Image (cartoon, coloured by chain):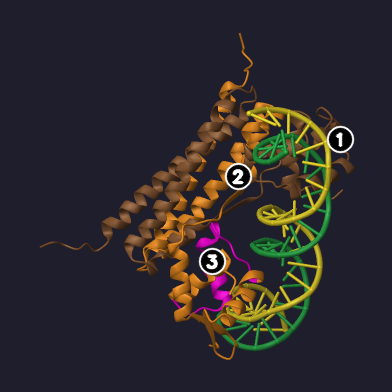
Chain colours: A brown, B orange, C yellow, D green
Amino acid sequence: MEQLSPTAYVILGMVSEEARSGYEIKAVVDNSTRFFWAASYGQIYPELKRLAEAGLVAGKDAPTGGRKRTVYGITADGEEELRSWLRQPPETVEMREEGLLKVFFANVLPPAEAAEILRSMRAYRLGLIERLRAMEQMTAEKEDPYPLIVLRGGLEYNEWFADWCERVEAQILDSAPEKRSS
Amino acid sequence: MEQLSPTAYVILGMVSEEARSGYEIKAVVDNSTRFFWAASYGQIYPELKRLAEAGLVAGKDAPTGGRKRTVYGITADGEEELRSWLRQPPETVEMREEGLLKVFFANVLPPAEAAEILRSMRAYRLGLIERLRAMEQMTAEKEDPYPLIVLRGGLEYNEWFADWCERVEAQILDSAPEKRSS
DNA sequence: ACAGGCATGTAAATAGTTACATGATTCG
DNA sequence: CGAATCATGTAACTATTTACATGCCTGT
């Protein structure tokens, strides 16, 4: 068996708590890990099949009312695989932040327009903070403490980022040659 | 002309400062933007061709000694395109951080092993900080202030992250049920 | 002579998103 | 009845990395 992709482990982790359908996994991911690891249907459904073939998860019919539905639970092998992955040092660390790229090249713009990039970035981070705060209550209710730890880390990160944007914006405007009235 | 990918703008930005070869672009990216926007040869060379066809960059032979070499410079159209991109609010914001994923699912591990994840993550960030610091001198020498602003932002970010790891590690070990001698 | 860096490029694989198709069920 | 949500899936596309191939030049 070739080794699994990190996205496979998201799914494995998500079904380890309780049996879930592909649809539910997507919903949970969108309300938790998506800020540092997203997953789309295009990944989830094929991956669930692969994991089932590998014997790491097991699907069973669990219709809601008359609506067809398959939930997947983790198997003993799957749990072992999950635990062994958790014990390896993390590898994938990636970031693609178009805003920083724009700041990097901002020298071709006048300072006022460069500052505008920072304002956009800050507004985006403030929006994220609101969404994360809305998720905080729900997450705090579970007995598993780790999702809350991560969520609060996300909040701190975005607060730092928003603050950085504010400081850099001020710095750009401060050092810009100003028009004097005298 | 279909719109360019953000990676195309990295290249456009990189040749806007001075004419550069694909090889040089890769080297500069690896020493600057790669922490928030990477680019590989597999992207750079084909993209340079596309940009040249679109008239946004222009290549010219610039052999070093007898060694064949093509450097690309930005055209007037290219500068216009770059500036107009810089004026749009940033769109792409992505993060894939396997460490946070592992912390998120750490409940299936005993606290001591969960703490180990944080130690790995912190060590990684400390390593990054060293590399960024090594780049700081060189970056500070240029007259364009923006790369230095971004680099220092990266330093602050990684320092925050390393500190967060330390705090969370302590928190996990603190709240773990301890063996008492009495 | 040979190692290492300069230089250009491509093929294949991997990863991931988007958009679409389909259909059932629930709620107002 | 119609809209929203539940539910599963796939095809096409886009993006990106990795690995390889090629060859020249420079310094030891």
Figure quadrant of residue A86: top right
Amino acid on which disc 2 is placed? Phe
Among all residues in the image, which is located at the extreme bottom? Answer: B66
Helix, strand or loop status at disc 3: helix
Of circles 1 and 3, which is in front?
A: 1
Q: According to the image, label 1 marks what residue?
A: A59
Q: Which mark is residue B29?
A: 3
Of circles 3 and 2, which is in front?
A: 2
Compared with residue B42, is residue A113 higher up or lower down, i.e. above or below?
above
Q: According to the image, label 2 marks what residue?
A: A36
Around disc 3, counting alpha carbons within 10 Å, would you say few (fewer than 14), some (14 to 19), or many (20 or more)? some
* Residue A62: % across, % down: 84, 30
**Which one is in front, B98 or A13?**
A13
* Residue A178: % across, % down: 22, 62
Q: Magenta region: which residues? A: B18-41
Q: In which quadrant is the C terminus of chain A drawn?
A: bottom left
Label 1 marks a residue whose chain is: A
Of circles 1 and 2, which is in front?
A: 1
